[in-house]
Amino acid sequence: MTLKNTLTLILCLCCCLNLHAQAQRKTDVVTLYNGDRITGEVKSLNAGILRFSTDAMGTLRVEWQEIAKLESIYHYDIRLSDGTRYFGSFEHDAGPGQLTVKDIYGEHAVDWLQVVEIRPIEEKLLDRIDVYLSAGYSFDKASSVTQTTFNTVVSYENENSQNELTARSTLTDTDDETTSSARVNLGRNVWTDRSQLFTASFGNYETNDELGVDHRFAVGAGLGRYFIDNHKTRLTGAAGLQLITENLEGDGEQQNVELFLSTRFRTWRFNTPELEVDTTLNLYPSITESGRLRSSADLRIRWEIIEDLFLDFTGFGSFDNQSESDDDFDYGLTTGLGWEY
């Protein structure tokens, strides 16, 4: 995938998603322990911070432990620290520090600090989609090296699954040559009956001039688990099998079966300065090609400057011990600005 094609993909996504979603009525009520009552709309709870939209004060970020009571007539996806998920509404008779969730199976009393995530169950498809875009540019005059990077994350969640599309494109210019690398990942996690487990299916496309990869397609499936999931940290792991079809420089097209091992670690800090760190490590030991090992890693650090605008630090690494090029490892680090929709 060339840089031009990647930019076209990102622009198309923006055009398709830049529509005015119909918001809920701002009738939700948050009561703080100091007695203050705020009327607005619950946007989400994640990492211990409730995002609450108001007409007069914009979107507020309220620490979850400072809230005594939450009232809403709408339905939500509520996830607890032990992985339990409820899909229902909040009852008004819950006491301070307690949440009573009502669903089709009855009422469930939940301790306040057990809740790690709340998401409104939107009726419209576009209301369930989140988009994050970032771009970075760097130039070193001494070495005459210019690097341009584009990243995008598009996610969609419903009652039973989490779906995510990520895309990255990097173009490097030097006096001698121009090289590029790009990767597009599409993943789907479906929750199982066991609260901490999920089934994972995925596909990706990759091209990398440094590693001699003209193109590589992969599809696979496996099983994943939440190991840590609380207000500040989330650690997941997954394992499975994938089939790859690749065209390497000088070696033609071939197919291989690989074992897929992945771990993802995320952590947040929402007191000043607000930070989010998201890192993923993947290992691909080959089953059909003896001795071959590939790996990939991604790092993203986001620091919110103003609402929905972030200073973005991104990094990636790709390794192949049987690369057709002179180098078996490629990496990149960039800074830029990101925007969340």
Image (cartoon, grey):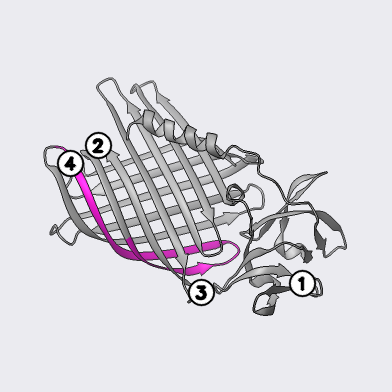
Amino acid type, label 2: Glu
Q: Secondary structure at mark 2?
A: loop
Span shown in magenta: 221-249
Marked residue nearer the N-terminal end (3 or 2): 3
> Taking 235 as reference, is 29 left or right?
right
Report the mark closest to the observer, 3 or 2: 3
Numbered label attached to residue 91: 1
In this view, which residue lies farthest toward the right?
Answer: 35
Of residues 2 and 281, the one nearer the viewer is: 2
Q: Which residue is mark 4?
A: 248
Predominant SS along the magenta part: strand
Residue 149 visible in this rendered orientation of the protein: no
Q: Which residue is mark 3?
A: 195
Of residues 244 and 47, the one nearer the viewer is: 244
| Residue 317 image position (x, y, % from top left) | 33, 46
Q: Is residue 316 above or below residue 104?
A: above
Residue at figure coordinates x 79%, y 74% from the top left:
94
